[in-house]
Amino acid sequence: MPLVRDVILRDGSVLRLRAPEPSDEREIEAFFDRLDPQSRYLRFHGHVRSDRVAQHYAAADGENRVALLAHRGGEVVAVAGYERLRELGAAEVAFAVVASEQGRGLGTRMLEQLAAHAAEQGIDRFDASVMAENRRMLGVFASAGFAVRRETVHGVTELSLDIRPTERLAEKIAERDHLATVASLRPLLAPASLAVVGASNAEGSVGGRIFANALAAGFTGIATPVNRHARVVHSVRAYPRVSDIPEPPELAVLAVPAEEVLDVARDAAAAGVRALIVVSAGFAERDGAGRERQEALLEVVRDRGIRLIGPNSLGLLNTDPAVSLNAALGTLRPKPGRLAISSQSGALGIGLLGQAVGRGLGVASFVTLGNRADVSTNDLLEWFEDDERVAAIALYMESFGNPRRFSALSRRVSRRKPIVAVKGHRDGGAPQHARSHTAHALRGEAVFDALFRQAGVLRVEGAQGLFDTAALLERQPLPSGRDVAFVTNSGGLGTLAADAALSRGLRVAPLAPATREALEAAAPNADRTTNPVDLGISARPADVRAAVETVLADEAVDAVIVLSVDLASVPPAEMLAALEPDDGPRAKPVVASIVGADGRMAPAIGSIPNFRFPEACAAVLALAGDRRDWLSRPLGQRPPLPEADAEAARGRVLAALGAGDGAARWLDAADVEAQLAMYGIPLTPTVACLHPDDAVAAAAALDGPVVLKAAFPPPEHASDVDAVLLGLEGETALRAGWDALLDRVARAGRDWHGATVQPLAESGADILVGAVNHRDLGVVSGVGAGGRQAGLAGDVAFRLAPTTDTDASELVALSPVVAASMEGARGTPALDRDALADLVLRLTRLFEDVPDLLEGDLNPVRVHTEGLTVIDARLHAGHRAVAERIRTW
C-alpha cells in the first residue's frame, strides 16, 4: 500500500499527504519552479535544477528513499522526504514548502509523518543540513519534539534528530493535534454562516426541515437556502448554487441526491466553504459504487483542506447561546445543558437525542457522524474536551477508525470529563490466525473491554444504561467510596436494592449508633432504622427528606439510594422534589427510584436522577464508583530497563526469520531464550535430549529432582497430551519416565521429537503472561491462569501496552484468578505480585521494541513468595513488511 497520511494544520485546514508516483514528476518540477529564489537558495544551499530534483523524488522506492507530497487546489504545495544512509539506522531528511503554506505547521506535520514511518522501518536518527540563516526551518526541527543535536560550521547547521518515540514527543504531537483539530471543527460546530443545499418549501423535504430547524433555533449567524429552482425558501432569499452566495458560508449542509453530491461539494469547496455536512445516503454504507463515490468526495475536501461530517449523517446541533445551531433532522428541541452526545448511527442518534429530551437532560452538543469519512469520534472528543459547557460525554460507537488514538485521547479527556459509551456490533468470535494462548483468549470484546477500561471510559450495555449513567454524572457528584445507604417506604424495595448493590460491587453501609438515634428522632414511625432504612408505608416527603439528610451526615455513607412507591397518595413529583438540596449541590450523590402506584414516574425537573427500577440505581452508582476508583489511581511511571537491547533483539529476530518470503514462524528455543535474556527475563535451564542417556546425564548435572517433558514444535505443548513428568530423581526413574513419554506420545498420535529436562521449580502459582502485537492497537498484554488450561476459562485480563508500573499492577489485579492466587490460600503467604508486574513490563517492552514479534506466551510462570520462574516460553515472529499483526476484530 502506498504511504498516505491525512494531517490537520494549526489553522484547522486538512491536507492529504501521499507518496509520489513516477507520473508526479512534472508536478514536482513545477512545485520547485514556483519556489521563490530565497526559498530555493535556503533549501538547496545554492543553484539546483528542478527537473533533476523532481526526478529524484518521483523515483522514490518507499524503502531506501521515502517521499511525501502535499496538495492543495490541485497543486503540489510541499515536498518532503528522507533517504537512508549507509550507517545503520540513519537517514537524511529534507523538505520544502511554498510561501503561501508556510506558518501553518505543514513542515512540522510532514516531519512527524516521515519520522513515524522511518521508526517503523528501524531508522532511529534523522540528519539534516540547514543554512544557519534559515531560522524558520531550524525552528521546525527545534519545536517538533525530537531530541536534537546541532553544530554550525561555515554558515551551515548540521542537525541530528533522535526520532525514536518518547513521551515528550507524544505530548508535543498530542498538543498539536488538539489545537489543530479544535480549530478545524469550529466551522462545523460554531460557524458564523451556513447554507443548506437542497432546502425547499416542499412538505417532507429533508433540506427544508434542516433549514427550518436552523431558523427556529435562532442561529446567531447567517443562514442561506440553496435551491436551483426556488427563489425564496421559508421567507429567506435562496441562491441556485453555493458559489452564487455573495459571501461564501463557512458551513454547507448537503441534502441532495447522492449522485449530485460530488458536483455540489466541488462548487462549495471552490467557493470557499470551510466545512461540509453531507446528509445524503448512498455512499460506502450501500455498495462498491457508493464506496468509490465516498472516496471521490473525500478527495474533494482534502484537496481544499476542509472538514466533512458524513455522508449519511443526520446533522448536528450546538445549544451554546452564542451559536444556537440546529442543523439536524427531526423536530426535537433539547434544552441547553451539559451533556455532549456523539453517535455513529444517524437514526439511532436521533433516538438518543429523544431519550435525552424525555429525561429532561440538557444537551450541549449533539453530532451524528454517519459514515465517518473524515470527522470521527476522536475529533469530537478533542472538541468536547475544550468546551467548558460539557460536563459529561455520551458515545454510541460501532467501530474505531484509529483505536490507539482513541485510547490515548479518551484517557486524557476522562481525567476531566466522564465518558460513557455503548459499543455496537459485538464480536464474540475467536480471533483468526491466533496460535498462542494469549492471542486465542483475546477475543473481540476482550479487546474493547481492555481499551475502555484502561482509558477510563464507562462501558454500558445499551441506550438505557447510557442515559441512566449520564443523568447521574451530569447532575450528581462522584461517591468517595462504595458504601451505600438506602431509604425506602417498602422493606421489599430496600432488600431488592441492597441485593442489586452487592451484586455490583457496592456495600451496604453500616450506620453509626448516632445516626440510628437521629433517625428515630426524625422519623419516629419508621419500621426500621438500620440500613436499609424502612420508613413505612405512611412516610411523607418530609420524613423521607429528613432521613436522607440524616444518613448523608454519616461518615460511613458514600451515597444514598431513595426508593418509594406511592402507598400514601403522595404524588411522585412531590416526593422527588422533597429530595432537592436547599443550599447548593451536596457532597455525596443521591439517586432515586420513585414511582406512582400506577407505575408512572415523576418528570425529571431537578438534580436528583430518578429511575424506574432499583437495579438501575445500583448500576449507575457502581459505574460512578468505578470512575472514582479510576481517577484515584496514580498515573505511574515508565520504569527504566537499562539492560534492554532493542537493536540486538530486533536484529536476532530478523536473522532468525531470514530473507525468505516473510512467512511467520515460531522462534526456536535458543532464539526465545536469547530474546528474553536481553530484557532481563531468565528462562528455567532446559536441556534438549534425543536419547534416554542424554536425559540421565542432564538430570545428574542438575543435581536434584527434575521435570521430563516430551518436546513438540511450538505452539504445541507437552501438557496437551499429558506428556509431562514431575519430580524424577535417579537413573531408574529417568529411564522409566522416558519410556512412559514414548507411550503417551504414541497413543496421542504425535511425532516424537525427543524430550527436555528442567529442574523442578519450587512451589507457587502457575500464571500465563503473554503479549500480542495487534494490528490496530499495537501491543496488548495479558495475564491469566497458567498451565494446561491457559486461556480457556475466560479469565485472561488484558491491557493495551501496560508500560507504567501502575498499568502492570492493575493488569495483575484485573484477572480474578491471578489476583486470588497472589493473595495466597488457606493460610499460605502471599505471592510476589511485584515480580509478576515487573515481568509484564519487561515482556511488553520487548514486544514494543521488536514489532516483528507477533504473539507470545510465557506459560507457565511459577510465582513464588519471593520472585518467579519462567518455565516455558513461545514467541511467534514474522517480517513486519509482509506479515500482518494479529487482528482480532
Image (cartoon, grey):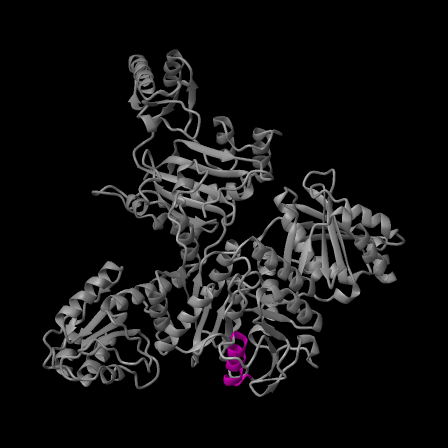
Report whether 548 appears left or right of 327: left
Judge from the rendering whether residue 89 lies leftward or rightward of residue 735; answer left or right.
right
- Give the residue at x 63% y 42%: 122
Residue 300: x percent and y percent? 66, 63
Q: Is residue 108 magenta?
A: no
- What residue is rendered at 80% in x and 60% in y? 134
Q: Is residue 217 magenta?
A: yes
Q: Please, is residue 392 above or below residue 642 in the view? A: below
- Foreground of the two, 536 or 332: 332
| Observer-nearest of 606 and 613 | 613
Q: Is residue 531 visible?
A: no
Q: Give 603 or 754, whichever is nearer the viewer.
A: 603
Range shown magenta? 206-219
Q: Position of residue 97 (x, y in %)?
A: 77, 60
Image-quadrant location for residue 182:
bottom right
Residue found 28% across the figure and 46% down from its top: 820
Q: Residue 649 in the image: x percent, y percent? A: 56, 36
Farthest residue to the right: give it.
47
